[in-house]
Amino acid sequence: MSNKNGITRRDILQGTVALTAGLVSMQPAIGHSKDLAATPKQVEGPFYPVQPQSDKDLDLTQIKGHKKHAKGDMLWITGVVRDETGQPLANAIVDVWQANAAGRYAHAADTNPAPLDPDFQGWGIVTTNELGQYRFKTIKPGAYKVSGRWSRPPHIHFKVSKRGYKEVTTQMYFAGESLNEIDSILNQVPKNQRTDLVVEFSQADAGNIPTGQFDIVLATV
């Protein structure tokens, strides 16, 4: 059985199995005495995937059956989904989508003249493991113009949900990007919360692929 986005239970389970196999080194902190603030919400945007897609696993850099990898600089994004008390949330659904390295979405509504990348998956869905952990392998998205005087900085869209908690749709940004400072969407977030959405990447992966951690906090319903 699949939902309106063409996501089947098998898709989610396959993502979860692969996720669990690769997250043994992550150790989330739990049991915070002070409540955590819920992750700031951001607009979903016009490019949430609407076309059915058979491959929505955690590796956005290679589509099943394709010999080539996506163009662009590869990244690992890891994180932990928690509640407001700091407890990790297992079986939360983490849904990500983004532009390719040229700043183009594989979406009919995107009129950006930048080229599409036929080898970039662009959309992935996994569930968190028993420690609330998730991860995705992807590429750094390109910036793109919204109007003549405004360009969006590189960013990745997240939608995270779990029964009993408020779904959050937000965006993850990259540290050190000058466009972050003038992005009207990021700047709508209170200044003291913006750092929750901006991620530093380091060369921590054995394959020399930069890795960044983006944690999510869900509020209870």
Image (spheres, grey):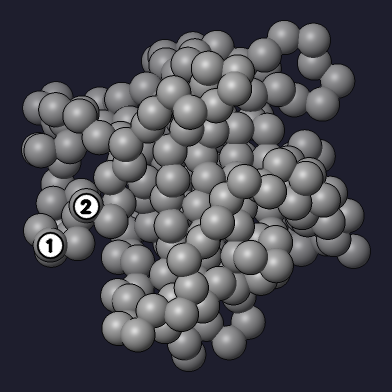
Residue 108 in which image quadrant: top right
Residue 187 falls left or right of residue 80: left
Judged from the image, the secondary structure of the residue bearing numbered disc 2 is helix
Q: Foreground residue, 12 or 200?
A: 200
Q: Residue at x 83, y 56 (%)?
A: 13
Q: Is residue 178 above or below residue 217?
A: above
Residue 176 falls left or right of residue 165: left
Count neighbours of disc 2 (C-alpha within 10 A) and say few if under 14, some if 14 to 19, many if 20 or more. few
Q: Where is residue 44? Give x, y as percent.
A: 41, 55
Q: Where is residue 119? Give x, y as percent.
A: 67, 17
Q: Residue at x 21, y 52 (%)?
A: 195
Q: Foreground residue, 129 or 154?
A: 129
Which residue is label 2 attached to?
195
Residue 72 falls left or right of residue 95: left
Q: Is residue 77 above or below residue 88?
A: above
Q: Are marks 1 and 2 in contact (CB under 8 Å)?
A: yes
Q: Foreground residue, 110 or 125?
A: 125
Quadrant the N terminus occupies: bottom right
Judged from the image, the secondary structure of the residue bearing numbered disc 1 is helix
Quote the CA–CA distance across marks 1 and 2: 7 Å
Mark number displayed over residue 192:
1
Is residue 126 at least partly visible in the picture?
Answer: yes
Count up the numbered dots: 2
Residue 93 in which image quadrant: bottom right
Q: Where is residue 82? Give x, y as percent.
A: 49, 71
Q: Amino acid at mark 2?
A: Thr
Q: Is residue 197 above or below residue 29?
A: above
Is residue 52 at least partly visible in the picture?
Answer: no
Q: Where is residue 216? Give x, y as percent.
A: 44, 62
Residue 58 in which image quadrant: top right
Q: Amino acid at mark 1?
A: Asn
